[in-house]
Image (tube, rainbow, N blue to C red):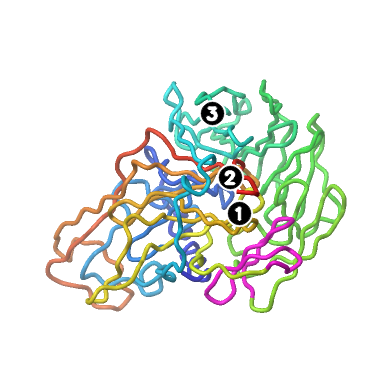
Amino acid sequence: MRDRDETDLVRALRGAAGGAPEPAGDMLTAIGDRRRRRSHRRARSMLAAAAVLVVIGGGTAVARDVLPSGGGEGVSVTGVAADPSSPAADPSEGTGKTPEMSVDPVAEVWPKAVSTIPAKAADGWKYRPITGLSATELLLTAESSFEKAGRLEVYDTAARKSTVLAEMPAPPGVKGYFAQDVEVGADSIVWWGKTPNNRDEWADFWVVPRTGGTARRVGEVTGARARVERIGVTADSVFWSVRAGGVYRMPLAGGSPEYVAGTDGLHLLYWPWAFDVANGREGEDWDRNQTKLFNLETGQTVAVNAPDGARGLRCGPVWCFGASGDESIVQRTDGSDRRALPGLSGRMEYTPLAGRFGFFSLSGVTGRDAAGEEIEDAHAPLAAVYDPITGRTAGVGKRDPSGGGGIGTGTSSSPTSIIYWDEDRRQVEECKVEDASSAPRSAPSGAPLPTGKVTVCSTTEKGGGKEFTVVNLLAVSPTE
């Protein structure tokens, strides 16, 4: 699947999701990439947010911020014309290239990085991974209801034990409040919150010591300064970038927000680095190449040397991933050590995970049968992680017998170190024959509608909910 196809699919699904009703029940199936348009996610159902969803069946389609709620979504009708203007309507969409490399499971490539954790706390609150604190410590939120984070916990994968770090309270008198992205600093952990179900341009910031304790509200902002995109924290300040570009700071001790001079058009990557492309803002040109990084602490600028023909180049301080033609590429920011990545053409994260790893979808398609139907490897991983230092590739996620499956990334503000999935959750397709007159219609305006009997199929997600398999990239040594 070419990056351009993936982008079109994402935009189409986002548009469909925008008018969905309030979600009902548990949609914690494929979780990740909450940075993209997170403040609008509370009002989604049929195409709900909080996810990287890998939909695989005759190929792979990667959709950011989209997650089926498990209530019969994903309806397909045999015999009813599909809207050709929809990127998802073409069955060849997202098939991608047949993988040209053998991808070993992550448990074989980086066994120390893989663990299982419970999906729920002892009191039944549901866990949502954020990022790694160390090679054996995972930062989690515990949610009392869908995306309603109520506390921070640390799970020790060696001791297999969870410890409460802090409560995440709502400010007094604020209705419809939801905590948003969490960010880990050297001494503190910060997060921001807002009221996403109303039109107020308002946000606030909270801080707690990294060792735990009582969370303290730093302050609040309104207007354009409340259009928070990503956050960072130092010993004395919380920083954030806004969707239109530009970085602000507020002292942790409280005080007025200040604009950081010289940050026009810049967006936080993670402290102290900012770059010149937006973090998934709707309307952003995904094919646009990043041209620089700026160190907010020292004032240093690192130029990015993009090769001719590159698209969507996104970089940390050292490594960049992008596309050229139908292949993905990796290089250092100065353009050195550039190489193609055959078989890895669908990026699931644009910025490198944990500052260095590429994250790609895998189609699982191995060829076509005599009738021209695609043949899938039901045991192929859903996705792959690539380490540019060692050149090793590891397969992540479990593909269910239907060819589908879900996989997600942790929800930290900066690029996370966590990838995770539910091994026991599966997609089940159920089909029935109906009169065409009562079946869902997606024919373009003016096209003839089908008559007679049609087969209507819907995909639901069943099982799971007990534990997650987690890959913590902080446990991967550069020498492995």
- The foreground one among 32 and 194 is 32
Magenta stretch containing residue 314, yes or no?
A: yes
* Magenta span: 310-337
Q: Are marks 1 and 2 in contact (CB under 8 Å)?
A: yes
Q: CA distance from mark 3 to mark 1?
A: 24 Å
Disc count in the image?
Answer: 3
Determine whether label 2 and label 3 are within 8 Å by CB: no
Tag 3's secondary structure? loop
Residue shown at 72%/37% (left/top)?
Answer: 185
Res 296 seen here: yes
Q: Answer with the quarter of the image where residue 58 lies.
A: bottom left
Cα gap from disc 1 to disc 2, whole angstroms: 8 Å
Q: Which mark is residue 158?
A: 3
The residue at which mark 1 appears reads as 357
User: Reading the chain from its start, which is encountered first: label 2 or label 3?
Assistant: 3
From the top left corner, tell me how far across and down residue 116 is, in percent.
45, 35
Residue type of the residue flagged with mark 1: Phe
Count residues near mark 2 (Cα–Cα under 10 Å), then give few for <14, some for 14-19, many for 20+: many
Camera-near label (3 vs 1) is 3
Seen at 34% across and 54% down, the residue is: 379
Q: Earlier in the sequence, mark 3 or mark 1?
A: 3
For the stretch drawn in magenta, the main secondary structure is strand
Q: Describe residue 290's horizontal placement relative to residue 433 as left or right.
A: right
Looking at the image, residue 88 sits to the left or right of residue 259; the answer is: left
Give the residue type at disc 3.
Ala
The mark nearer the N terminus, 1 or 2, is 1
